[in-house]
Image (cartoon, grey):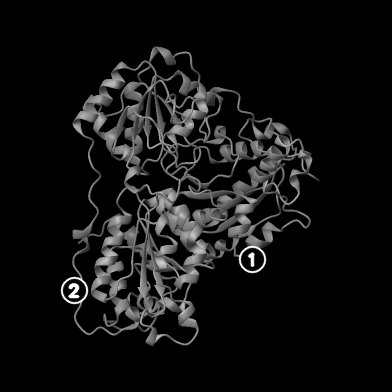
Amino acid sequence: MKTSKNALKMSSQHAKRSAIDRPQNLGKPQMKWGSDVVAEVTRRLDLKYIALVPGASYRGFHDSIVNYLGNDNPQMVICLHEEHAVSIADGYGKVTETPMAVALHANVGLMHATMPIFNAWCDRTPMIIFGANGPVDAHRRRPWIDWIHTAKDQASMIRNYTKWDDQPASPQAAVESVLRANQISRTAPYGPVYICLDAGLQEAALTEEISIPDAARFAPAPTPAVQSESLAKVVNAIGKAKFPLILMGRVSRKQADWERRVRFAEAIGAAVLTSSNDPASFPTTHALHIAPPCVRPNKAATALIEKADLIISLDWLDLAGVLRLALGEAQTQKPADKTIIHCSVDNYRTNGWSMDHQALAAVDIPILAEPDQLVAQLLDEIGVKKVGKLRTRPAMKQLGHWNNGSLKAASARGGQRMTQWDMAMTVREFAKNKAVTFSRLPIGWPGEAFEFNGPLSFIGNDGGGAVGTGPGHTIGAALALKDSGRLTIGVLGDGDYLMGVNALWTASHFDIPVMIVVADNRSYFNDEMHQERVAQMRSRPAQNRWIGQQIDNPRVDLVSMARAQGFDSEAPVSTAEDLAEALKRGAEIVAHGGRYFIDSLIEPGYADSGPDQRSGGGKK
């Protein structure tokens, strides 16, 4: 029988994965302990990786993964900090839309991990987290250490920003717990779930046979379809519109869904706006993507929102907020004078603890479905089966595409020290026509630098506004894309990099090809701007804004820190020409399986206001 090319490729990838940290002398391991049961169910769910920092509270589960499963499916991805373990799983899940497993040590490891767990919650990222407790039975606790590593209702620390949690009390209960966790995490809106494993359960010998059912019978249900009545209302609203605008928000990473979104926009002749914070959702150079991507509406986006008589929100984050900023209206008390369609399933998981659900938007046609489900049904409803002629509405004929304007090339500055605008345009030019995935882009990165042509061009920034998650997100994304032929690049702020730098070690240990580029302005610059605004409001000297903000004197050696984690690097670059050459050298190293770091020195200031960005003006 012939072996297919895909099978050979999968076998090769499996061999590469298994060659790292491979256990020996396993023989034919049998399921004999409580933790073996948890490991067996996890394997049947095909969770390929488990990011972790070791800890005695889950030593039984650790042993089961190594000596029962053979450290394969899932394979351990060892990290130097619990925050990085969760961030790596977050980056992986943002690419694949499937959960990666995480293991955290007792209550202390969970305490470390709370911030990136909240971030994954805000990102709507699927993730299965295994925590652990010292023995619930106090009689079985070792003196001192087991007591401080045991907590009553440990999951209460994160219950407000996880979809579900459990602490099974027996191996039989653990089977259902893991199956349910997988089902809930993979059901939209996605999110992290938490299973706390009692050390006593893990280390107890099995006293009876444990039956593990077929995991396929506990899979999540398909996304709900849009009701025919609501679908008819949407079609009718589109038919009446003179200037429809689609706000492409949180949508899927699937290529087929991407293509359907393009066909839908073309079929109805709608302008499109995308967020610079969410993953890529629509080709930014497309004729209908009239304004550059943004978080808060820029001048061009504001003009589109003002002009639109129909707004179709595909799970746009903070719909009420963007309308308020663009139209100058109160977010709830005075709704926009436009027909608004909002498609989202986010209401399924809103709670009162976190305000990540944002303001309440006034909507004429609410659709409780995943956005790509609505798009697919609308294409069927209006009879669009394949790419057709772009519909041009009269109201759009005079509008030029933002990309047709004069984009100031970074190289035009002739060797001067880079601003963020110069850096962004250089990175854009480097990535043009290449299979590049940007795992992160820093604060102030201009929408004009976004040239995205597929759903994996950009996986979005951190939904929880965290700092220090960028390195982990980048490594998780690169792990998901390993052997895909795509170049994963994380463009990070220097503060984000410094808080998460030792996540880079995991990439080196696990042989993950990746490039990290730091926009190094030697400052917590976002907070400099906040301090300037406060000083101005209080009629105080704004030039003091740099105090307590700048990361300088002494200059932090970012390059040495990357090299210490096993990355190749070079001296910092400070001009667009040098950055362009460094990107080429780095891409060559990554293409051969390596890891590369670039410290890109830029002048303080943000580029999201255009090439003549505001100078930092801080102390030099």
- 470 is higher (above) or lower (below) than 511: above
Q: Which mark is residue 564?
A: 1
Q: Position of residue 327 (x, y in %)?
A: 50, 24
Residue of label 2: 211
Q: Is residue 353 left or right of residue 523?
A: left
Question: Which element carries disc 2, helix, strand or loop?
Answer: loop
Query: At which x and y percent is residue 378?
Result: 26, 29
* Residue at horizontal 60 percent and vertical 50 percent from the top: 517
**Residue 143 has which mark?**
none
Q: Is residue 366 left or right of residue 494?
A: left
The reply to whether discs 2 and 1 touch (Cβ–Cβ < 8 Å) is no
Q: Identify which residue, 256 or 471, lies in the foreground.
A: 471
Which residue does the image show at 74% across and 34% down from the upper left?
414
In the rendered image, the quadrant that contains the C terminus is top right
Residue type pointed to by label 2: Ser
Which tag is nearer the camera, tag 2 or tag 1? 2
Distance CA(mark 2)–CA(mark 1): 47 Å
Q: Secondary structure at mark 1?
A: helix
Crowd class of label 1 (few under 14; some 14 to 19; many from 20; radius 10 Å): some
Q: Is residue 482 visible?
A: no
Give residue 453's quadrant in the image: top left
In this image, 136 relative to 535: left or right?
A: left
Residue 567 x, y percent position in the rendering: 60, 61
- Front residue (pair 188, 21): 188
When the figure is inspected, residue 31 is found, relative to residue 168, above or below; the finding is: below
Tell me if residue 508 can be seen. Answer: yes
Q: Residues within 10 Å of mark 2 (few under 14, many from 20)?
A: few
- Residue 348: % across, % down: 31, 46
How many callouts does the rendering have? 2
